[in-house]
Structure formats: C-alpha cells, structure tokens
Image: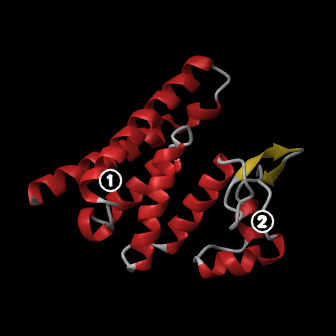
Amino acid sequence: MAHDVAALAAELTDMAAADHRLAARANSDDPAEQLAWRRLTARHGDRLDEIMDEYGWPTADLVGEEAARAAWLIAQHADRQLDVQRRALQLLRQAVSAGSARPRELAFLHDRTLVNEGRKQIYGTQIAGVKNGAPVPWPCEDPERVDELRAEAGIEPFDEYVARFSPA
C-alpha cells in the first residue's frame, strides 16, 4: 500500500506539472492548442475519477501536501466533466469537515463548479475575463458578503485578489 500511495503522489504531481505546462493553451487563438488543453484536462479528470473510486479524496495525510494540491488543481480544471468536478467537490467538502483539507481550496472548487453550472459564485474566485484592462469576475450570489466569506475560507480580500489579474 505504501508503494501504491507513493506512486499515486508522484502521478498526481506529474499531472499537475503537465497541467501547468499546457495551461497557457487553454485560451490560445490556435484551435489545435485549445484541443490539446481540453484533451489533457479530460484525461486528468478521468484519472482523478478513478483515484476517487479507489482512495476517496487524496488528502495531504494520504499523498502529501504537493500531491493533494495537484488533485485539487486537476479537479479545478475538469471544467468539461461536471460529474467529476461535483464528485471532487463533495469529497473535498468531507475532507475539509474532517480537518484533512483546506477551506481555501474548497471555496475555489465550489465557485468553479457553480460557474460551470451557469450559477453565481459565492467567494468571487472566478474571473470571466478582462474588459478595458480590468478583470471582470463572474457574478456573485451575495456581493456584499464576499470579503467576509473569503476571510472565513482563508482567502485574501476580493479587491486584492482581482488586482492580481490586472495588466501591469
């Protein structure tokens, strides 16, 4: 089992590294690059689904901090596999409740899943794009409480976060 878990941790971190290498292609003007990104995230989503079948949510206690974060990234980018994203969200929510995962990652995945369902986000973590040089976040369910909810999840204030998406 220990060998299996070590191999799983290595596999997850390798998947995240590939994700980082190809992420720029997600919004490329080249359809072939967009397709390469979609294929990668679909393969990773399928594999994460298998991992969740076997292990549940891959927590830091199981696979280490880096691999647990990699699993979250894979779930976050499974945008065209809502079933996988919803399942990851449910398992991650249970892990956070048990104290074995971070509320910050849960908040980001929750918002991402809501946006992919065509609903308003809660924590203001998802940016729709940039208009006239300014980041445009997806609509929020309760904009007046966003910073309070973000603080509860361990996320910086909304204005600080959005400023990171502004062109320098």
7 to the left or right of 97:
left
Residue 121 in the image: state x and y as whole percent. Answer: 71, 60
Say which amino acid is labelled 1: Met
Would residue 100 be seen by someone viewing this image from the given angle? yes
Q: Quadrant of the N terminus?
A: bottom left
Q: Could you say which is closer to the camera, residue 141 or residue 40?
A: 141
Residue 101 seen in the current view: no
> Relative to 128, does residue 67 appear above or below in the rendering?
below
What mark, if any, has residue 103 been given in the picture?
A: none
Quarter where residue 153 is shown = bottom right
SS class, disc 2: loop
The CA span between labels 2 and 1 is 29 Å
Q: How far across and down, in percent of the image, does residue 19 sit? A: 45, 41
| Residue that badge 1 annotates | 52
Residue closer to the observer: 54 or 128: 54
Residue 40 x, y percent position in the rendering: 44, 32
The image position of residue 54, as x and y in percent, is: 24, 53
The crowding category of the residue bearing disc 2, from other C-alpha atoms within 10 Å (few below 14, some 14 to 19, many at least 20), is some
> Looking at the image, which residue is at 29% across and 51% down?
53
Would you say 19 lies left or right of 150 here? left
Residue 141, label in figure: 2
Q: Amino acid at mark 2?
A: Glu
